[in-house]
Image (cartoon, rainbow, N blue to C red):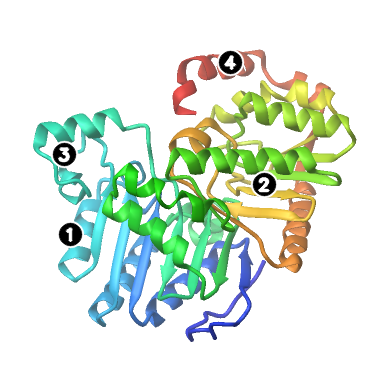
Amino acid sequence: MTSPNAITTTPNANAPVQEQIYTDAIPYFDAIISAIHAAQFQVDMEVYIFESNDIGAKVASALLNAAKRGVTVRLMVDGMGIDDQFPTLAQKLINDGVQLRIFRPLPWRVREWRFSRFGLPWLSKLWYLTSSVNRRNHRKMLLIDNHLIWLGSINISQNHFPQAFGGKGWRDTAIKITSTKLTLPREAFEVNWNALKLKHRKALNRRFIHSEYLFNFTRGLRAARSRKLIAQLDHAKQCIWLSNAYFFPDSRLLRRLESAGKRGVDVRLLLPEKSDVFFMPWVASLFYPRLLNAGVLIYAYRPTVLHAKTMIIDDWATIGSSNLNQRSFMQDLEVDYCIQCPENVQQLKSSFELDTQQAEVLNETALRKNKRWQRWLGALALLLFRPWL
């Protein structure tokens, strides 16, 4: 766990990239709220879940205060990740100078349509929101001025706090990057905020493909992101350690993990024993026998819900919002970051090893302990809800 101090000064243009990893929600939220209060001219936030509770009120208050100081504040939240009280909070934010948009409001929640980024006629908007209801903005990204960015798997949600602080103690990982080179993340935010047409997005592909920031807002970027992951897995020599909340691999990923295990690479999967989507561990378990036969170690994290999304492949590592499922690969907007500082790759490895010490190592005997009806329901969920997984 870390307790970083908020950075409020603009770094020198030639200063090296600084990274700070968070595995604890309390210092994470303390840091982002402090940074919002210290913002000088720009705050851009997009997040999948924004709850209208204690932490939501605190973040909203910081955004309001920044807007009142003359800072340009923009907030985009996903239509799937808000509660019934959010429209009231949204209107207050807008009234006090915060620019706010809801990414694809759910079509049956008409009250939220007015916050949509698309100014379409009523019937056209209904058709658009209905036809695209399965495509969500799953990114968690905060940009402040031109030198600070936070990203990872932490939403504006009480779930991430320890139980002693009114939360559920979800296990998450996030990172703060201090850098003068945030042009691409800011452009990615602009693409989403302004709903740029696909032809304009394609023009960005070449510069984004080779960035340490892994975005996927075009088909080309999705394909490049998949190729990068497959290449890393194919060339792995020492270790492949993956921590993820929802494990539903496509055939290419599954084959690469099997192949790596068979050629002697230390392949470990850290997955949740219990999930906020109750049947996902049952779905994931359908893939376990093949992986176990290939020598892959599978850990079921026991203390609480594992929600982190990290990858460590030899000396290459990422932190971000992407799950190992079809939604992240094919549908949702995501962002992951390739760690640049070797010492932080080592820190992430140490954190992974600590997590595995709190997990059960699964084997064929452990799998047989699962109730048969859970395996059948996992298979049924995979059959019925594959497009949503």
The residue type indicated by label 3 comes to Val
The residue type indicated by label 2 comes to Pro
What's the distance in space between the residues labelled 1 and 3, CA to CA?
15 Å
Q: For mark 3, give the secondary structure.
A: helix
- The residue that disc 2 covers is 303
- The residue that disc 1 covers is 91
Q: Look at 21% across and 38% down and name the residue there.
A: 109
Residue 208, percent from left and from top: 50, 54
Mark 2 / mark 4, whichever is N-terminal: 2
What's the distance in space between the residues labelled 1 and 2, CA to CA?
38 Å
Q: Is residue 264 above or below residue 319?
A: above
Foreground of the two, 218 or 155: 218
Look at the image and tell me whether residue 223 can be seen: yes
Mark 1 / mark 3, whichever is N-terminal: 1
Residue 297, percent from left and from top: 81, 35
Q: Look at 26% across and 41% down and name the residue there.
A: 105
Q: Look at 48% across and 40% down and name the residue there.
A: 220
- The residue that disc 4 covers is 379
What's the distance in space between the residues labelled 3 and 2, CA to CA?
39 Å
Q: Is residue 349 above or below residue 246?
A: below
Q: Is residue 152 left or right of residue 341?
A: left
Residue 110 disc label: 3
